[in-house]
Amino acid sequence: MQQLVNTLLGGLTLGMVYAAFALALVLIWRSTRIVNFAQAPMAMVTTFVALRIIEGGHSYWLGFAAALVAGLVLGAVVERVLIRPVEGKAEINAVILTLGLFIVLHALAAVVFGNRYRSFPAAFGIRGIEVGDTTIALTGFGIFTIVAVLVVMGLLVLLFRFTDLGLRMRAAAFNQEVARLLGVRVGRMLTLGWALASLVGSLAGLLIAGGSLVHPGYMDAVVVYGFVAAVLGGLDSPAGAVVGGLLLGLSLSLVSGYVGSQLVALAALAILMAVLLLRPQGLFSQARERRV
Amino acid sequence: MRRLLGQPLVLALLGAVVIIVVLTGVDDFRAVQLTQMAYLGIAAGGLTVLTGLNGQISLGHGALMAIGAYTTALLLQDDEPTLPLLAVLVVATVVTLVVGAAIGVAAARLHGPYLAGATLALAVAVPGIALYFGDTLGGEQGLRVRVPDPPGWLLDAAYFVTGQDLTPSTYVAFLGWFVLVVTYVGLAHLSRGRVGRRWRAVRDDEVAAEVAGIALGRARVSAFVVSAAAAGAAGFVMAVSVRLAAPSGYSLTLSLMLLTAVVLGGLGTLSGALVGAALLTFLPQVITDAGVSAGLDDIRAAELAPLVYGLVLVAVVLLAPAGLVGSLRLAWHRLRATTTSKGAT
């Protein structure tokens, strides 16, 4: 019983991170119909920025904020410089482009920051909280993770539902031509969408890194889990991404706890295939007709 | 004459002569490098047919190579081989083909980014299987591969033709390039014939292809199966060459390298895949040396090669979507078109 509770609590924390990462993928998919496979290395680079600042003797929170800002800027630059030329072209071009960016950022981080494992500090305790005389697997940092992701999601909902800017961003994502005719600066909205998504991705990177080890490849598996979570919820649906992330976090935690941690990626693959073959539009997305 | 030179079999015979001449003149180090080029070339050839001719992207070909390599390793555990090496090659290819068929059936229903994501998951997941079944698959250390000695008649024949003794590395290099030539002849015949036309039709316009009576699913699955078989053969050569099948050799990096090779060379052309494989094999040393002489330490300098590949990959997509070979070919056609039109006027 205690093991089950601990496994589920671990899955909850992990699921929140996957949810954030999936949300970043969904934001980009909605606006530009591109799956950003470079999301993980982008987040990794910003985590290293934070680590540099923290190791330079500054506070954790300064590094945290700097990483988020770096994510925002990186997302905007990537969209403006690299993605804009392939928008609306064949799907395969964007896929190869983001994978090229994946390789570039990976290698760049290894050249600049070195290829060894380094420990990343956590803002809060990483020991389990004691309830009575048993220790449960919910750490202070775990609670922070859950709260941080919830706050960011709340802010995104506020932005998209209740502000003029959010309305314009949704219009640009919904139908570029019509939005452009109505005076929306579609290009700027797409850049902003990428920037926001990259910020959310950076947050996920910081939360995974907290209290554990980082190296240039530490996020590689997460891009797979984030993608599976996003597809599980429906690539079009932000709420679906959150639910998908939580479901995936819980299931993978169960697999890791009861079967073996080596098979986690295989379980993710099995879930992905099951979803794609049984309900390709995901749990929450509206089915859309595709020719053939 | 031009027509004759364009035939895959004739090209293959010419290639075989070049291979024999080159491989007899090289030392063991170069032989190992050339074997690496061979297995990257075989897998890239399969991938370029899948991605270039059929429009399906796969980031999981490294994982398919792992299946071929582990099958090879499992069959070559004993000191006394139970099967001759060519039979092992056939088994490894067939096993990968069957796995590829299962994946291909699922993949045929996916497109673009979904397929990329699913195969990416495959590339990340497969090494975990080797870790989980550590007792039979050797875990992190992997399985050793015992390569049987070359048969006596081959040693005699090699000595007769080249006047040199066949070293183990050169033997494996010959084996790798033999597999490469056979694979490329097969792939070239398939892609020129009816099957290849169907693959291209499906890639270019699904609706038109279906109206013309092509079964979309069957065309997609067959392309994936052929491509997987090539990856399995490549896995065999890789296992025999490095004499080890370990998870670290078949990471996501390998899959991304293969994709880089086919994009660099130009999607859909076998010559492009071979050029890409050559670049991936020989360029890292040059770039790493340049990095060391520029003052980087060894570990960081080793990361410069992927950095260059990645940058070139991005540049190719943005500036020359036809790849290096494709772009050169386009430029050549344009040049010829202008000279002929000038001659006409």
Image (cartoon, rainbow, N blue to C red):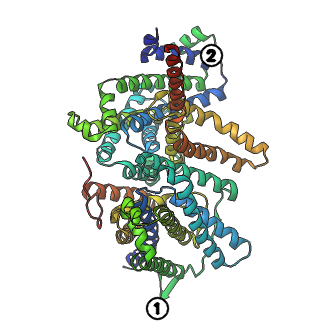
The residue furthest bottom is A132
Q: Where is residue B148 in the image (x, y as percent from the top left)?
A: 51, 27
Question: Considering only vertical position in the picture, is A242 above or below A101?
Answer: below
Name the residue rendered at 53%, 51% in the picture: B140
* Tag shown at residue A132: 1
Quadrant of the image occupied by residue A249: bottom left
Left or right: where A27 falls relative to B208: right
- Neighbor class of circle 1 (other Cα within 10 Å; few <14, some 14-19, many 20+) is few
- Chain assignment, label 2: B
Circle 2 residue? B165
Q: Where is residue A159 in the image (x, y as percent from the top left)?
A: 44, 77
Quadrant of the image occupied by residue B100: top left
Name the residue rendered at 59%, 42% in the picture: B312
SS at mark 1? loop
Residue B295 in sight from this viewpoint:
yes
Q: What residue type is labelled 2?
A: Asp
Q: Where is residue B272 in the image (x, y as percent from the top left)?
A: 51, 30
Question: Considering only vertical position in the picture, is B154 above or below A169?
Answer: above
- Chain assignment, label 1: A
